[in-house]
Amino acid sequence: MHSNIKITSESSIKSAMAKIDKNAMGIVFVVNSSDKLVGVLTDGDIRRAILKGANIFSSCKSLMRKKFIKVKKNDSKTKVLELLQKYKNIIKVIPIINEKEKLIDYATTDRLNFIPIYYPRLKGNELKYLSKCVTGNWISSNGPFVQEFEQKFSSMHNKRLSLAVSSGTTALHLSLVALGIKKGDEVIVPNLTFAAVINAVLYIGAKPVIVDVDEKKWTINPDEIKHNITKKTKAVIVVHFLGNPCNLGKIKSICKSNKIFLVEDCAEAIGSKYKKKLVGTFGDCSTFSFFGNKTITTGEGGMITFKDKKIYKKANILRDHGMSKKKRYFHDEVGFNYRMTNMQAAIGLAQLEKFKDIINEKIQIFNFYKKNLGKNKYITFQKTENKGLNTYWLIGVKFHNKKIIINELQNKMLKNGIETRNFFYPLNVQKIYSNFKTKNNYLAQKVFDNSIMLPSFPGIKYSEIKFISKVLLSSIK
Ligand SMILES: Cc1ncc(COP(=O)(O)O)c(C=O)c1O
């Protein structure tokens, strides 16, 4: 056990601070003279106490929490994992005691060999570039990294003009506003997606029209787009779901013949291709998310690439409060603050340097899952679009056996330390969106009911994929 995780109750708060500093876990466990665990003390507790005037030479006993979560030596791994999951936003370390209530060890998800669904890879120049922001005093959206990030993104995406924004959601909203979509217009969206897509349509008072997906590819069905176009339809937002490119050939020609805008949501699909061309180069506006669990991350953040320079210029002004580019603090339009900070862009730039490695690794991860699970008659993977390249943001598997109950399966996986996730609930079954459905029985529901997403982070070990596959196969027998 880490020697700096334990402190005696008579020790000073200053000593506790020194131990927390060394253990880098934000907490110490307080024991009495018989080594019995009697309390916990976090860096937050200490900070708050000092702000209220506490003396750092007083004893830990005076400040420690006496009520806290602990587990016993013989408690199952499942119980500990469930507690770490339940309190994951507040507790990262749980003390383990023996029958005499002595502290004998501590549990963290890492120590339990927990395999999360995702975490980002931040092993390149992220910290180096971030510290340049701090030492150079450029931490807001003013700063050289934002433009550098945009330029690099443009050169990757067929030189399309790119605009960095604060999130994938604001990228969608800003795109719709810049394209001139207004109240009363209709915008077609897929039923199987994260809610940001439909929310962006609702923000501007337009009417979302929820259409179905292909049962095998899990992406929007072009025929459903066609059937739901009316005189009021102004745009369609397609989502390259989990990294699978939509059928952009068919969709582009539908948009062209009906004179409607195409917004490509590439939040889950940076690097994916359709007919050898990157997604993000097809839409009138194409949006990206760099949220912490995305293939390329900036913590929070997003990007738009544009087909048309005029729309780009409009979005650029709207991103910054609608302020005139010629006259500072003079506003030509009612705009937003959707800017990306220099710090986010610094991380983004470092991430782009590793982009090819990450994408290649993700494809290998998929191939390895396929090798381990592909022969099972109850399992299918997402069918990649014809002539498409899927970069597998998250790897989904769909089951073909009514006896497999998804919740039960997920619990079994969790008991083995494996995090899985169910798909996004279809939009039509969520009350706030149900008015916008176009039919009652969506195939999206079938996909949702029978599928889960598996750990898919770059850096996952092949031994871990083997283990996940073994647990999965034994759970669906
Ligand atoms: C398809 C899709 N669109 C939009 C978003 C929203 O992106 P953000 O979280 O950066 O706002 C997400 C996020 O998961 C997404 O999956």
Image (cartoon, rainbow, N blue to C red):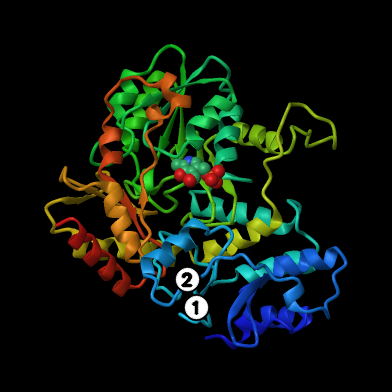
Label 2 Cα crowd, 10 Å radius (few <14 / some 14-19 / many 20+): some
* Residue 363 to residue 338: above or below: below
| Location of residue 368 (image quadrant) | bottom left
Residue named by callout 2? 71
Mark 2–mark 1 CB contact (< 8 Å): yes
Label 2 sits on what residue type? Val
> Distance from label 2 to label 1 (Cα)?
6 Å
Q: Does the closest atom of ligand 1 sit within 8 Å of the Cβ of label 1?
A: no
Label 1 sits on what residue type? Ile
* Residue 24 to residue 447: above or below: below
Residue named by callout 1? 97
Find the residue positioned furthest to the top.
231
Mark 2: which secondary structure? Answer: strand
In this orientation, does residue 280 appear? no
* Residue 217 to residue 395: above or below: above
Q: How many marks?
A: 2
Q: On the picture, is 305 further left or further right than 24?
A: left
| Location of residue 63 (image quadrant) | bottom right
Name the residue at 38% across, 17% down. Answer: 229
* Residue 434 to residue 306: above or below: above
Q: On the picture, is 365 further left or further right than 341?
A: left
What x and y, as percent, mark residue 399?
Answer: 20, 47
What x and y, as percent, mark residue 333?
Answer: 74, 26
| Location of residue 28 (image quadrant) | bottom right
User: Which of the two residues, 237 or 11, is positioned nearer the viewer here?
Assistant: 11
What x and y, as percent, mark residue 400?
Answer: 16, 45
Mark 1: which secondary structure? Answer: strand
What x and y, as percent, mark residue 204?
Answer: 59, 24
